[in-house]
């Protein structure tokens, strides 16, 4: 996202804030404070030094403009932020300043902060998905018997119900939701030190990593500086949310066309109009969802293009991943927010649905008639016979039922009552009710599960505007770590 005029329309400010400058600084400082606490607990650094570091990490409010400028020179924001923290600690205790960022490396800080950001983003997305799934479940249940025409390859097909269509929307969101939440508990700490060995911590290396993971509420993990499976999984999960939201939005846009008119977004002043045509009523929220979904593959491709991280530390690959991952999460949040808006007050024209089902001379029931004739004639012969009837109906512009009723080859096998049943859309809905029940059951299981939330030991990281506080010390870039 670029802080442009459309960012709130095609994104999600609250999810974007999870990866924003304020939150990123808070996450990185939380890492530094927790690292000092753990090291003091293991007697790797003095307790007094750790207390000073923790206090300064909790109160430091870096000048974001300076930090951005320094990041250009340093190649990542962890370096100038650590320098600012070191300077702040030195003002209180010069001796303690030497223990800031003890044994860690920039990528440890950046990757762990990225996982903390992803964690808060998932919490936001989970809440929105739960609301959407609850609404869609109610909609599917309410319209389980509302008949409409199914459309395949853009053409009218056989009968279905609006409830089953909505159940399909629900299934997509539930599946994406489950995959996203499954990642929540697996978000790993990054702690490998300069070369991925944690050699700087000596015999306490494993203990430092395990305790630090607990403090930050992340999963313990071996260093993954260049093994980026979790980043790809997260990126795919966020993109999957976009795709799952894009499906119902696309259907709404298509069904809102004047020639179809089965669905319409709620009307409101200033919503859905045209700058040139006063009669327009555009499905603007659904359009925004589609736009978010269309943007997701590009950001996902960026993450997957970075799969080949070099040796023990990549040059440029992990730097490129984080913005793309943040964009995917923000697009997912925007897609869900706009889908909520599209569904809120959605107008459903059941008469139009029934009208379209009965239009086109009733040809949509051709499969039902073929299947009714198949036991006597065999599938191929039954289809050939009905295909002949369809051709006559089109040529003569007569309803398919009338043509079939006048064909002796049909009457030999189907009496009037049997033919009427074969032509009744409501009698040819198959297992649609069962599929709806299955979708509702799946959503209910997910709704009953506890929402993802940070563990009690996890660091609390604000995503709000920069709070008031003393100005940060000017970063000293000569104190760069190994990067």
Image: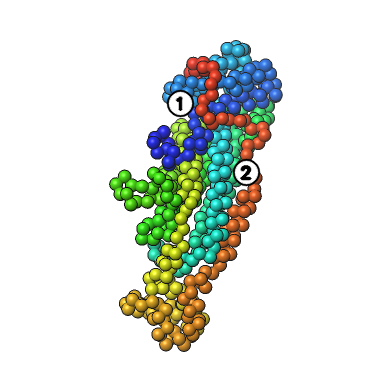
Residue on which the image places disc 2 = 451
Location of the N terminus (image quadrant): top left
Q: Nearer the viewer, residue 162 or 47?
A: 162
**Which residue carries the number 1 mark?**
75
Asked whether, in this view, residue 29 is left or right of residue 157, the answer is right
In this rendering, the answer to whether 292 lies above or below 3 is: below
Whole-percent x, y for residue 424 in the image: 48, 74
At horizontal 47% and vertical 47% (from top left) the residue drawn is 341
Q: Let me know if residue 233 appears in the view.
A: no
Q: Is residue 468 above or below residue 389?
A: above
Q: Is residue 474 above or below residue 423?
A: above
Q: Nearer the viewer, mark 2 or mark 1?
A: 2
**Residue at the front extreme?**
269
Colour convention of the picture: rainbow
Q: Do residues under tags 2 and 1 come within 8 Å of each other at their CB atoms?
A: no
Q: Residue at x 49, y 26 (%)?
A: 77
* Gap between marks 2 and 1 measured at Cα: 37 Å
Label 1, residues with CA under 10 Å away: few <14, some 14-19, many ≥20 = few
* Residue 21 in view in this figure: yes
Going from N to C along the chain, the mark reached first, 2 or 1, is 1
Say which of 203 and 108 sits in front: 108
């Amino acid at each position: 996202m670029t802080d442009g005029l459309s960012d709130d329309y095609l994104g999600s400010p609250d999810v974007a804030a999870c990866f924003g400058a304020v939150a990123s600084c808070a996450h990185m400082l939380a890492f530094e404070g927790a690292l000092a606490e753990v090291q003091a607990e293991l007697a790797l650094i003095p307790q007094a030094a750790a207390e000073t570091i923790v206090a300064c990490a909790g109160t430091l409010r870096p000048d974001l403009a300076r930090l951005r400028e320094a990041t250009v020179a340093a190649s990542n924001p962890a370096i100038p932020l650590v320098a600012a923290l070191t300077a702040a600690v030195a003002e209180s205790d010069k001796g303690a300043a030497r223990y800031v960022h003890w044994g860690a490396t920039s990528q440890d800080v950046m990757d762990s902060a990225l996982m903390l950001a992803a964690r808060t983003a998932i919490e936001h997305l989970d809440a929105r998905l739960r609301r959407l799934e609850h609404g869609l479940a109610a909609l599917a249940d309410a319209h389980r018997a509302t008949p409409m025409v199914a459309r395949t390859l853009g053409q009218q097909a056989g009968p279905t119900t609006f409830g089953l269509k909505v159940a399909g929307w629900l299934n997509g969101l539930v599946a994406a939701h489950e995959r996203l939440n499954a990642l929540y508990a697996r978000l790993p700490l990054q702690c490998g030190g300069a070369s991925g060995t944690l050699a700087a911590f000596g015999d306490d290396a494993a203990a430092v990593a395990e305790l630090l993971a607990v403090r930050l509420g992340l999963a313990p993990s071996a260093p993954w500086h260049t093994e980026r499976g979790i980043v790809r999984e997260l990126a795919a999960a966020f993109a999957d949310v976009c795709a799952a939201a894009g499906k119902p939005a696309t259907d709404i846009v298509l069904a809102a066309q004047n020639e179809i008119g089965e669905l319409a977004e709620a009307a409101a002043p200033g919503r859905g109009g045209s700058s040139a045509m006063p009669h327009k009523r555009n499905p603007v929220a659904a359009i925004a969802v589609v736009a978010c979904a269309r943007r997701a593959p590009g950001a996902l491709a960026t993450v997957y293009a970075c799969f080949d991280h070099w040796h023990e530390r990549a040059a440029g690959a992990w730097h490129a991943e984080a913005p793309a991952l943040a964009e995917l999460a923000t697009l997912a949040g925007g897609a869900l927010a706009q889908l909520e808006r599209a569904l809120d007050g959605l107008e459903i024209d059941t008469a139009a649905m029934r009208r379209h089902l009965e239009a086109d001379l009733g040809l949509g029931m051709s499969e039902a008639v073929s299947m009714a004739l198949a036991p006597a004639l065999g599938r191929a012969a039954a289809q050939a016979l009905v295909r002949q009837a369809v051709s006559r109906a089109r040529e003569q512009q007569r309803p398919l039922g009338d043509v079939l009723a006048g064909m002796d080859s049909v009457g030999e096998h189907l009496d009037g009552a049997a033919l009427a049943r074969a032509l009744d859309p409501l009698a040819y809905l198959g297992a649609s009710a069962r599929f709806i029940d299955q979708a509702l059951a799946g959503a209910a299981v997910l709704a009953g599960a506890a929402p993802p939330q940070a563990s009690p030991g996890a660091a609390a990281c604000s995503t709000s505007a920069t709070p008031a506080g003393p100005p940060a010390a000017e970063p000293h870039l000569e104190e760069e770590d190994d990067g």
